[in-house]
Image (spheres, coloured by chain):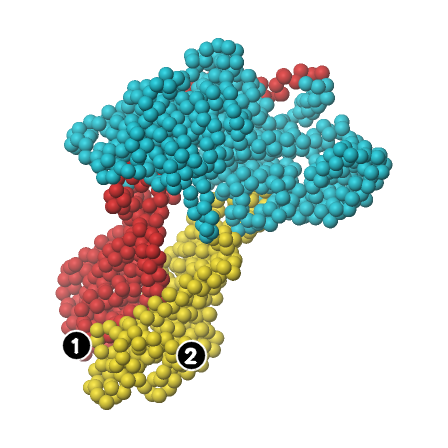
Amino acid sequence: MTDNTETIEDKLDQLQRSQGPLLEVKDLQVDFVTDEGKHVHAVRDSSFSVYPGQWVAIVGESGSGKSTSAMACLGLLPGTGQVVGGSIKLDGTEISHYTQKEFTAVRGSKMGLVPQDPMSNLNPVWRIGTQVKEALTANNMDVSHEKRSSLAKALADADIEIKSEGDETFLGSKELPALMEAAEQALVKAGVKGDRFEKSMERFRQEWVAGSETRWRVADDLIKAGVKDDDAWYIAKKYVLGSTVEDRIAGLLDEAGLPDAATRARQFPHEFSGGMRQRALIAIGLACRPELLIADEPTSALDVTVQKRILDHLQDLTDSLGTAVLFITHDLGLAAERAQHIVVMYKGQVVESGPSLEVLQQPQHPYTKRLVAAAPSLASQRIVSVEERGEDASAIMEHKVNEDSLEHADTVIEVDHLTREFKLPRTRDMFKAVDDVSFKVKRGTTLAIVGESGSGKSTVANMVLRLLKPTSGKVTYNGEDISQFKGKGLLDFRRHVQPVFQNPYGSLDPMYSIFRSIEEPLRIHKIGDAKSRRARVKELLDMVELPESVMQRYPNELSGGQRQRIAIARAMALNPDVIVCDEAVSALDVLVQDQVLHLLNDLQAKNGLSYLFITHDLAVVRQIADDVVVMQHGKLVEHGTTDEVFLHPKQQYTRDLLDAIPGGKLELGLNLD
Amino acid sequence: MGKYLLRRILQMIPVVLGTTLLVYALVFALPGDPVKAMFGDKPINEAVAAQIRAEYNLDKPFFVQYLIFLKNAFTLNFGQTFAGQPVISEIGRAFPVTIKLALMAFVFEAIFGCVFGVISGLKKGKWYDSVILIVSLLLISVPTFVTGFLGQYFLGVKWRILPVTAGADPGFLDLLMPAMVLGSVSMAYIIRLARSEVSSNVALDYVRTARAKGMTNGAVTFRHILRNSMIPVVTYLGQDLGALMGGAMITERIFNIHGIGNLTYQSILKGEANMVVSIVTLLTLVFVVCNLLVDMLYAALDPRIRYA
Amino acid sequence: MTDITKPLPGQERYVAPLDETPLRAVDNVDETAPATSMWADAWRTLRKNPLFIISGILILFIVFVALFPGVFTKNDPNYCNLDNYLDGSRPGHPFGFDAQGCDIYSRVVYGTRTSLSVGILTTVIVVAVGTLIGAIAGFFGGWVDAVLSRIVDIFMAIPMLLGAIVVLQMFRTVTSLWKVVLVLALFGWVSTARIARGAVLSSKNLEFNTASTALGSTPMRNLFRHILPNSLAPIIVIATTSLGSYIVSEATLSFLGIGLPSTTVSWGGDISNAQSILRTNPMVLFYPSVALAITVLAFIMMGDAVKDALDPKSRTA
């Protein structure tokens, strides 16, 4: 740490102590009323606080009350939810009893929201720019001058002195070309030449964004580039004259990391990818420079590398603006990496809270301990830490790479130069979803295919399951080309290669009882009579540790994890050799995910199963796989044993994926007992 | 947008051809002699029958008949009635009246349907929501002709607020009650549609995001809830405009309006097969064109469609 | 320099007492809740819906009247005596007499059977034909879907009433009830086909079909075991609602004088006959109208209730 940063942190700490908490929630109680008029306690006696400029994370699984607590602060509880007790103070003012009208006055300007699902949170019929503009007009924002929090000012004053109110005027797009020209001349006049000149100009081109850059920053940049103080201020005053609404909208979107913002602002949400929509939502949340930003799982729907980039960006942005962030997440590693203070919620209650690292290194409450133990990101990190210390990590590994089988066992599934093309809609172009992929799955081992959305990993899975025909290349099962299977041979193949799909809500027929669902494969393959099938179903339920009584139940009555266990039981019904798990644990809460992974590992050890495990989450891979294939844009990028890939990644893309595992740089406690 | 329009127009062609063919077949080619049907219960005059057969090309193969009909229809030549009047001029006299009636009904159902539906949807569970719901259920259940008679009896005969029947060349007041009766069932459907759209949109994520921006309740309601709820309502309204003209028959009969519905009904009774085919063809065209307009409007309202 | 590692006030380390926040097993099954299938679930929702109770009782009553009209009246609806021309109510004839001197009450009672038969028969045919065609279009897709969808468009473009009148005009001499049923079905199947196609399309793409295929199931087995059962809900809803509308259509056709023959007792026909004496004797028109409206209302309310109960959105995941 340099002296400079130390003083800033020091200053921040002093400011926080003198100003007191920005948001203070005490003994909050939120109830929902059911159709029958019963009160259900969603949040009970929960307390937490957020100081100016601070990131505080609330961690918990679905249904823990973490989002409900945050929404209560905004006065946006869904349905019948209402605050029935406790207090919520914003800047010392009690707001828990506010009417909707009073809430409207503080929303946007004092508290902003970045919601969870980028797909459903933008209105499809309005342009992106219009939706940003709504935030500006709703709060009567001055679009030509920057509004900065006292905190941001206080912290930035160390660098530059702001002389007058006009210095916070935004740069307008109209004056931008003239400004660039004047800056170029000023640099020439100041005698800046050659490489330094080019670099300075490049920097100006990048940083001087209309609607985002202010007069004092332009002056500052010029001075830093070597222009004399007076000249710099003269130019800044002459050309930085304030921005239009359109400039400001583009500026906001640019700050949120959206390239080519002015054009993008005129587009509709459906023309945006998930990551771009999330950036637009961040721009909306921060449009009126709120002092507190509530970020409700802002990146959980996105790919890991995109997630990291967006969070990095959000962190830079809120740091420079002095915005406090209440960060809601299910990922303990992510929370610890981003926030200074962590609040762990469980079944509507705060079970533990404290400084991030402390909570992570010495979890006290059994639930937190469980969470720390189960989080895949932390688990894989733990292994790395142990191995870096030169100790044997096998003691803490849930799944140890089976080197022996990888080398000597025979090949069950072989994927040989597999390619699959799809026709793009309304064009003649073909799109290669899978491009020349080859790998082998050895008997009794797990091969994981890792990749982000659009990498073609699920397409490979569907071809291995013979649900999709390859354009070229082939898949062999026990040395036989699966495309040649017909009739009885195909039925036999289906019997030995079973799937478990991602969506635990979709892969079980809602009209079938659990018994019928698990019995279905036995019926299709005409195995046993009614009595023996019943016995088999009982046995299978026992195998996945579910009580016999669930047989008469229907999928809608079970949780996601329970359904996924049913799906595994169904896959196991025919004693298969190979199970293809397509994102089988991605939709599950951390603890449940851990439970299902354990189950899969146990089944493999007991029955000698081979798994083809498709996932986007590299952290999970460490807990289950022996062999890893990394895919990107349909191509195989890297292939190696799990240890090799984690410890010595060869490709930059693999390193990016590894870097994106949250909590990667945390020092972890290893003693969880 | 242009491409989309072109595609929709191309899709229209087989529907128009198919519909006219179907109607033509129903009238001229079904088992049973259409000429016989024209005479109804009267004895058949063989000479007249032969003349009719020749005039309608009934002596030629079916498809040839149809093609001749199509060719003539293209030039708006629909032949003549028994009385020797050109069919097109008869239709020309009746059509404006029906258009007037249908437009009035359309405006009535659009305004009242949307207003009541939106109020109901925004205030779900309040007493006036229940009242609006019950009234709309009743309007759907009671057949138009009963609604018409009730209107006639109460508004016309008992309280004497509006004219009981319209008669020839009706004015605005004459058509007011018929338009309300004609539009009542659709209004009820619009109320239900708007209500369910609004009440489900209220809980959507982007509405919450809009509130989180600090927008006032009014702005959120107009810009996000209503704007999006109106898309399916507009679709329904557009399709209904075509249907209103076809459905005007009952209303026109009750209120004695000399419009297209009444003309159709009289033609059917008199056995004017030519007239019936012509009218149904025209109404189908109106319906299909209305649908095209709806699609255009839909594309304008929902940006996702333009590129699909 | 202050010690910045010291937590800010109110953010000190906190651990909830364990007895207040007991830890439960991960993902355990609540074995106390009763098991419910989708139908049992729907039934539970229905039972509590007043709309369903009212419409259910009404429909049971209407069906009973249709089956056993003799229980409600001893009078012959076709016995008309002009001596009774427009007479008021008297014992045994609570609604009085119409312009032909027929007993209105018994005509209303006997008319129930006509309306209900037309409604039910039409619905049965429409559901069978519509579901079949819709399911074929949705399941096979491609050119089969394209052709069938265009045919549906064509039928959609013809106003039902107009089409029905044109066809009925051809068969004036046929007096059977089936004439009206078949004509209504001819123009009514399209809406059911559209709904069935949509339902099959959406359940075809659900993951459990892929799962079944991977288990070794054939496409046909999927269609009958998974896709069709999962497409039933919207078809049931439209069937219930349109049953009411077919009754209205039949009455409308009879009202126009080209539906059922005048020898068949029907509400629509009686309403039509009462039209001319509306100004003097509105009650003659009132009774059959009310019977008709109540019947239709019952089925539409039932449709609403069933829709609420079978709505997938209302089923908790």
In this rendering, the label closer to the viewer, 1 or 2: 2
Residue A317 percent coordinates (x, y): 64, 33
Quarter of image, res A236: top right
Q: Residue at x 57, y 34 (%)?
A: A310
Q: Which chain is cyan?
A: A
Chain where mark 1 sits: C
The secondary element bearing badge 2 is classed as loop
Q: Residue at x 29, y 62 (%)?
A: C188
**Callout 1 touching callout 2 (CB < 8 Å):** no
Q: Nearer the viewer, residue A4 or A109?
A: A4
Which label was assigned to residue B75? Answer: 2
Instruction: Reply above or below: A63 against C38.
Output: above
Any part of residue A3 in sight: yes
Q: Residue at x 23, y 89 (%)?
A: B47
Residue A472 percent coordinates (x, y): 38, 40
How many angstroms separate mark 1 from mark 2 (CA)?
Answer: 56 Å
Circle 2: is it few (<14), some (14-19), or many (20+) Cα within 10 Å? few
Which label was assigned to residue C81? Answer: 1
Quarter of image, res A417: top left
Q: Residue furthest top?
A: A391
Q: Residue at x 22, y 55 (%)?
A: C61
Residue B192 percent coordinates (x, y): 41, 55
The amino acid type of the residue labelled 2 equals: Thr
Q: Nearer the viewer, residue B251 or B136?
A: B251
Q: Colour of chain C?
A: red
Q: Which chain is yellow?
A: B
The amino acid type of the residue labelled 1 equals: Asn
Chain where mark 2 sits: B
A241 to the left or right of A314:
right
Circle 1: is it few (<14), some (14-19), or many (20+) Cα within 10 Å? some
Instruction: Reply above or below: C291 against A46.
Output: below
